[in-house]
Each structure stands twice: as C-alpha cells, then as structure tokens.
Amino acid sequence: MKQKIKVWDAPTRLFHWLLVLLMGFMWYSATQGGDMLVWHLRGGLLMLALVVFRMCWGIWGSDTAKFSRFVRPFSEIRRYTQGQMSEDELVGHNPLGALMVIALLAALVFQTATGLFAADENTFTNSGFLNHLVSEHAGTLARKIHVNFFNVLAVLAGVHIAAVLLYRFVKKQDLITPMITGLKEWQGNVPSLRFAGIGAFVAALAVAAAAVCLIWLLRK
C-alpha cells in the first residue's frame, strides 16, 4: 500500500529553490552589466551564504541531506546502475544524484571564489570584494576564469534538469513534487529518518552569516 512520507526537510527545499532563482538572477545581472553588476556582487554574497549553509547542513542536518548518508562508494553506484538497490536504500538522493549534488556544490564554490577575486575589466569599480588582495594580473585571470567557468556550471545544471525530466517521463519517478512538498510516495516499510531541529538550522545559518560578514569586513 502506497503512502506519503516526509523525505526532504524545509531547509533543504528552501536551499534548492533559492539556488535555482539565484542562478538565474546571477546570469541575468552579469549579461546586463552596468549598474546590475552591483547587484551581481551582492548576489554573489548570497550565493556564498547558500553554499556555506548547504555544506553545514550536509554535515549536521537531516539524514537525507547529510553527505555521510547519500555519498556512496563506487561499488554502491555500480549496484544502483545495475538495478540491484532496494527502494529502502534510495529514500533520499540516489547514488548518481549524489554525484550531481557534489559536482554542483564544488562548481558553485569555485565560481563564487573566482568572483570574489575577479577584476572589473572596465572601471574596476565593480570588482570582486576581495580583488584588492591579489595582483592586477591575478584579478584579470580570476575574471576570465569566472566568466568562462559559468559555462561548466550551466552544463551541470542542464544535465541535472535533463536527468530529473528523464526520471519523470521515462522512469515514471517524480523527483520535483517531493522537492516542493517534502513528501514522497512510498510503498513498503517506512524508513527511519532523523530530521534536524531548529538548533541545527540556526547553527548552519550562523556559520553562513559569519562567512558573509568576514568577506564584508575584508572588502576594500
């Protein structure tokens, strides 16, 4: 008998959809240039906060958000691709989905870092907050990497979206609705999952806020 169980907590879902919106805004503000670059820089700080929060939540957050629970060794990934994993083992991210999560987070860390040190190629008034800490050459290089690496980030996002659509229309597994409602249709024994409380959430927020404050204090 199918029933609905809670799989994704509110912080994980909020992070996911804020990230979707922010990536769209960051692309738009970068392509517009001019005064929008000021908002692009501010958006970069929010991106930093989101990534730091998710990394913290991946350490002490809810079970389905914890890296230790969903990042699998190669042997487990092979079992999954061969269809040998039971539903009970796939309550959160599947092994391939876990690889995408790690790849996207790593790419976002790299993109954010290069943006912080990047130089504004025209007036230098909209350079990254930490651009003054590196040489002119390093700042110019960081900008080139930042601009070009966005293509890698876009490809990863595209692969992620394509995979979600593949699961929805080919494998008949809806991955979108659970990330909105937090609930997933489940058949069989209800898995035992621990969901982090308000204390863990506040701690993750505090670390994210501290990271942003540090960058703000180091700005020129």
Image: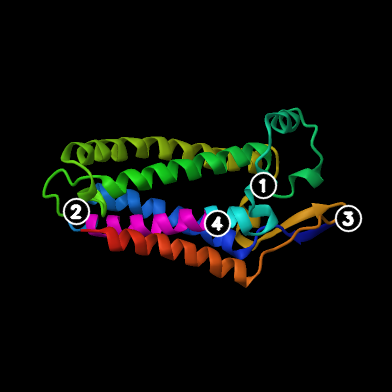
- Name the amino acid type tagged 3: Met
**The N terminus lies in quadrant:** bottom right
Looking at the image, tell me whether mark 1 or mark 3 is earlier in sequence order: 3
Report the Cα–Cα distance between label 3 and label 2: 58 Å
Extreme-left residue of the structure: 123
Look at discs 4 and 3 and give the one toward the viewer. Answer: 4
Looking at the image, tell me whether mark 1 or mark 2 is earlier in sequence order: 1
Looking at the image, tell me whether mark 2 or mark 4 is earlier in sequence order: 4
Element carrying mark 3: loop
Residue 12 in view (yes/no): yes
**Res. 40 image quadrant:** bottom left
The secondary structure that most of the magenta stretch takes on is helix
Q: Are marks 1 and 3 in contact (CB under 8 Å)?
A: no
Report the Cα–Cα distance between label 1 and label 3: 30 Å
Element carrying mark 4: helix
Residue matched to label 2: 126
- Name the amino acid type tagged 4: Cys
Describe residue 166's horizontal placement relative to residue 217 as left or right.
Answer: right
Report the Cα–Cα distance between label 1 and label 2: 39 Å
Residue at the location (64% across, 44% down)? Answer: 168
Q: Are marks 4 and 3 in contact (CB under 8 Å)?
A: no
Give neighbour class at mark 3: few <14, some 14-19, many 20+ (Cα, 10 Å).
few
Look at discs 1 and 3 and give the one toward the viewer. Answer: 1
**Foreground pick, 219 / 81:** 219
Residue matched to label 1: 68
Residue matched to label 3: 1
